Image: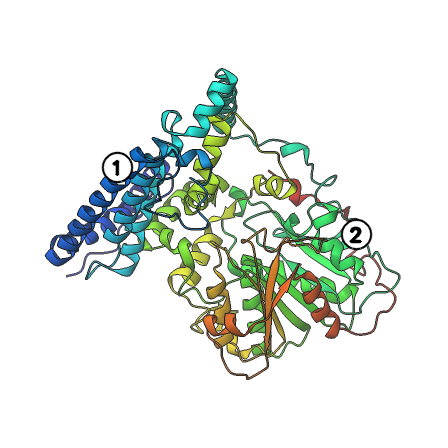
Amino acid sequence: MSLPNAPAPTQQLDTLVHAALARMSGSLSPTSALLAWQDWVAHLAGSPGRQMALASLAATQAQALAWYLAEALSTRPGDARALVAPPAQDRRFAAPEWRQWPFNLWHQSFLLVEQWWDAATHGVPGVDPHHERVVAFWARQWLDMCSPGNRIATNPLVIKATLAEGGANLVRGTQHLLTDLAQAATGEALAAPGGFAVGRDLAATPGKVVLRNRVMELIQYQPTTAEVHPEPVLLVPAWIMKYYILDLSPHDSLVKYLLDQGHTVFCISWKNPGEAERDLGMDDYLRDGFFAALDAVNAICPQRQVHATGYCLGGTLLAIAAAAMARDGDARLASVSLFAAQTDFSEPGELALFIDESQVSLLEAQMAATGYLKASQMAGAFQMLRSYDLLWSRLVHDYLLGERASMNDLMAWNADATRMPARMHSEYLRRLFLNDDLSEGRYPVNGRPVALSSIRLPVFMVGTTTDHVAPWRSVHKLHHLCPAEITFALTSGGHNAGIVNPPVPGSHRTYQVLTRPAGGTYLAPDEWLAAAPLHQGSWWPAWQQWLAERSGAPAKPPRMGAGHYKPVADAPGQYVLEK
């Protein structure tokens, strides 16, 4: 006989215990990590050949380190040849002070230990690939924490600053630490980080809110040219952060750039959800978000197709909507643009380290108590993915050197975080990340599955070279899921800085771009890299030209609002100000 389903009180007990465990573990599943370590330890214990290879590597490294020590003691300071050269992107030991005795020995010893653990956590026969990545990741976290650069006595730059300032740097660092601890304890964010205020310095492009519902506000922006292309642009940002990543300061606002090039621009501003929005799901964001916005744009710009543009999660939502529209014969879109947006989640990059059944179940239990996922719960995972850039380098800079980095507009936007509704986040993680329903043709819209292969509209996609959230090789997968014409641009930068990429003189940014015609031959990522020409500067002009080529001749701008969609507030609206 099978056991009956657990009664509600038993389920509630499990949920309460799991939620408490999530609070203690920083929203990361200890069971998931334990299973990975058990898998690795068990298979390594049963692999004597692998153990011998690792022991031989350790002996070789010890011998090389002894030779290095002898050379370092017998030559002028800094002249000893490095045993281990850190990766090009590793800036931890780039300063010349690290080549002086004894700091050269310490950092070289540390790099050798990193090298050994990288070998130890990879290639053990029988270990599940996901478990292997988890073990390697946690090994890197522990090693990063133990880096000689993170301690006063072993960091030459900190010692130099302390001696030069008579310890004043440590006094300032302590003050910074106390300020940050007090802010973390109260949970209060700065009202205007770095002096940047929303509506004044950020999200300041003039416009009107022409629609407000329980999910979003729709902003129509005031035109800046006498004539505009008749096809409007509808921007669909991610709801994991505020929309004004696309409307930062005037000099790097994508919204303003499009307006100045003669486009009519609309943008969705998502509501920051609370407990009352706990039951909002992906279908609500699709219906009351994208399709409600599209209805409004169609009313204000009648008989005009729309250039729909989605960023990150907003791009994934747009891909789902475009597939549903293609299935249903809805021809209201002129094109689809996807910025750093995944449609195939089979290889989602390092975020997959935090997404398995154990982890998702733990998050669901924690969200059940509050009705939403807090920004701080997501921030911890992102910090660990780039632990040096986002955690340890900041601790050294702020607390040991006693310095504060000056805030820019992108940093101010990043500090203005949002929440995620419990139901939507659970559906997103399960349907897309765990089950990969969208790329497999199983994702339902209005009770029927959609297929990306149905999309025939021209597509412009952007990937970024150092994206940890939506790796460009994963973004590129749409090429073999969709037969439409696809123009793919790969730009330097990360998930945010690669998209916020205004054309400015002397920019060091680069991008590659290549168009695959409708029904054309598939190029794998490495083949695409070899074939796509390299360009200097921003990709924005290339995209704008792509839009213009698929738009009509410029004409008189539409009115601000129309019919039922009359302006109800000035931009940036009400929802973006909610904390």
Q: Quadrant of the N terminus?
A: bottom left
- Residue 324: percent from left, percent from top: 56, 72
Name the foreground residue: 75 vs 56. Answer: 75
Q: What residue is drawn where x is 88% and y is 66%?
A: 556
Residue type, numbered disc 2:
Pro
Q: Is residue 76 above or below residue 267?
A: above
Q: To which residue does mark 1 refer?
A: 70
**Relative image position of residue 322 (x, y in whole percent):** 59, 71
SS for callout 1? helix
> Residue lying furthest top in this view?
166
Between 513 and 482, the residue placed more toward the observer is 513
Residue shown at the point (69%, 68%) measured from the top left: 307
Res 567 label: 2
Return the x and y of residue 251 as percentages of the image width and height. 73, 48
- Residue 451 seen anywhere in this rendered image of the structure: no
In this view, the residue in front, 437 or 522, is 522
Q: Is residue 280 visible?
A: yes
Query: In screen coordinates, is 252 left or right of 316?
Result: right
Disc 2, SS = loop
Q: Residues within 10 Å of mark 2 (few under 14, many from 20)?
A: some
Label 1 Cα neighbours within 10 Å, binned few <14 / some 14-19 / many ≥20: few
Residue nearer the viewer, 431 or 522: 522
Residue 441: image quadrant is bottom left
> In the rendered structure, which disc, 1 or 2, sits on the residue that comes first in sequence?
1
Which label number is shown at residue 287? none
Instruction: Calculate the distance from the C-alpha at mark 1 to the C-alpha at mark 2.
Output: 76 Å
